[in-house]
Image (cartoon, rainbow, N blue to C red):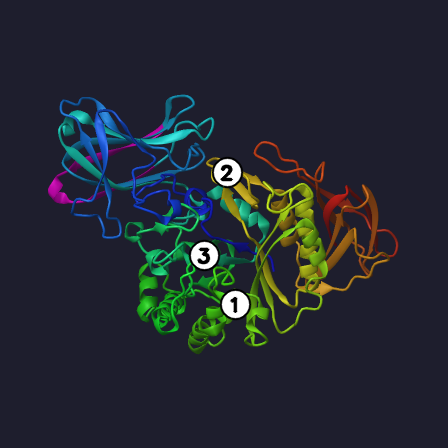
Amino acid sequence: MYGLLYEDVYHSGDGGLYSELIQNRAFQGTSVPNNQGSYQTLQYWHTRGADVLTLDNDAPLLTSALPWHMRVDVANGATGATGFWNEGYWGMNITTKTRYAANFYLRGNYEGEILAAFWSNTTNSMLGSTTFQVNQREEDGWVPYAQTFTTRVSAPDHKNTFHMTFDGASVAGHSLRFQMISVFQQTFKNSHNGLRMDLADALVELGGKFLRLPGGNNLEGIAAPYRWKWDETIGPIINRPGRPGTWGYVNTDGLGLLEMMQWCIDMNLEPILAVWGGLYLDGEVIAENDLQPYIDDVLNELEFLLGPATSTWGKVRASLGYPQPFSIKYVEISNEDFLNGGIPSYIGYRFGMFADAIKRRYPDMRIISSIWAGHFNGKFPDNTIQDLHEYLSVNQMVNKFHGYDDAPRNQPVLVGEYAAIYDDLHVEPNQLDNPTLQSATSEAVYFLGLERNADVIVGICHGALIKSLHDEPDNVALLKHSPNAVTRSMSYYVAKLFGTHFGTETVAISGDVNYGPLYWAGTRNADGRHFIKIVNYDGAASTPITVVIPGKSNVATLKMLTAPDKYSVNLPGNMQSIWTETSIQPSKGSRYTFNLTGSYVSAVLVV
């Protein structure tokens, strides 16, 4: 039931979960202000020594996907080391605990050494380095270089940069050209082109069971032609052109379709695949007569993922190291088509044309609508799931406890995005900077309502999984990160508490009080283990609880989440959440008695 949503938003991918340290590694650009003007730049690159850096597209290119490279012009009479450096994504995590892989392509005449090194801005010292031996001529074209290395010392903080230097005298009055300068920190499970370890570890802790990918508004694209194109996110990274992303910066698409599928493999997650459905975020809609090529593109994507290695696209997948097809049971047609005037065309022809084509090819596929069933005016297609996104105030969250009690059982729901974004101190449009204890506890009440209706709820995932503290310190997310640290929010711990304690069967629970301020629900596994969840929302400071589970006599574990104050938040270096685990001995009659301490508490009794 509990899962994850991924899209590259606020540098959750590039500069976040994607383990690349170099920003603007292939000179694809950085910022995309209002989708205006050229976005390829040398931003985040700086000269050091007797050279000038220039963005150039002189042939031959490394690949057609990467039309620009960095030309390094060395001054006449230059001596000593010269070169350039990169800021990274506002710093880098440099530690002796991991390996680093440095790669680049070079064009030009040079014989000698190129030193690649990490430097600390705080100590003004080299942290570690590797040396490349180079002997090439211009006529050799683009020559690749790759080495793995470790550092001598760990940096005291994240204020670190990556430098490349060479002998200036050997190139004086001439130029060297560089492309795809990449440095990876060791990845989660050592997957190729993979995930940043500390962020990935935090995701594993959540206990999610599915991954909704690749978004999110970033799927749709800010305007034509910048939708997410699956076939431009596969294969060698030098063949991925990237694109202006939805959230104000260029996406490298290094964390592409296959990397996301490997993510699912590494964390044992069920993929829920969203496909582009004919609507751009600027409101442009593909006309009915022009839609077929986009449907064909989706069928090609599905063949790439699901087809045998002998099929056209399955053969491509196999050539990229995945001979066996993946398993995909859910496909969502587009994302949030209630935006930008998308509803009429979605119910008029777009949803049906995509869904029918997919079902003809894959009759067992579960199809998900990106809009509420009610928009279909009583004609919601059979065997279709509706994806609802609920960004609510704390009061609305709590009121949703009964929100699905009377929902039609033939119209299942994926809560593809949720978040409490307003609390008693933050009212619309003044959103929360970070989840508070109050907002996270309201989400816990909301979860209980979903668990009580698990027969109609397919799954739930937070609308903001990861955000960079550089990009978005003032908006809610489960996780926020700097280059060398991860901050787990109040909402993260509530999601972890519930996601890691969810059974396979809902159990009926009777109480001697009405719901509010106490709320509860329960599930159990086939082995008889029970998960009884109780939430105190704006209740007494201390509430005695007795849970009776007939036939149980084993010691239970009580796990509770609270904080000093309803407005407490978790910030870097100042974690206010309090997670406790206590053993509860049963008394006569299988009675488990304990106190909920705090007016805002989320608890799970594991029996």
Pick whichever of labels 2 and 1 is earlier in the sequence: 1
Instruction: Establish if 425 lies above or below 413.
Output: above
Q: Residue at x 39, y 38 (%)?
A: 99
| Residue drawn 55% across the image and 52% down it | 463
Q: Position of residue 16 (x, y in %)?
A: 45, 43
| Cβ–Cβ under 8 Å for marks 3 and 1 | no
Residue 209 lies within the magenta run: no
The numbered disc on residue 368 is 1
Q: Which label number is shown at residue 469? A: 2
Q: CA distance from mark 2 to mark 3?
A: 22 Å
- When the figure is inspected, residue 591 is found, relative to residue 40, above or below; the finding is below
Which is the main secondary structure of the residues drawn in magenta?
strand
Could you give the CA–CA distance between mark 2 and mark 1, rounded to whole angstroms? 33 Å
* Residue type, numbered disc 2: Leu
Picture quarter containing residue 380?
bottom right
Magenta stretch bounds: 128-148
Magenta run includes residue 132: yes
Estimate the x, y position of residue 219 in percent, counting from the top left: 43, 57
x 54%, y 45%: residue: 202
Q: Label 3 crowding class (10 Å Cα cut-off): few <14, some 14-19, many 20+? A: many
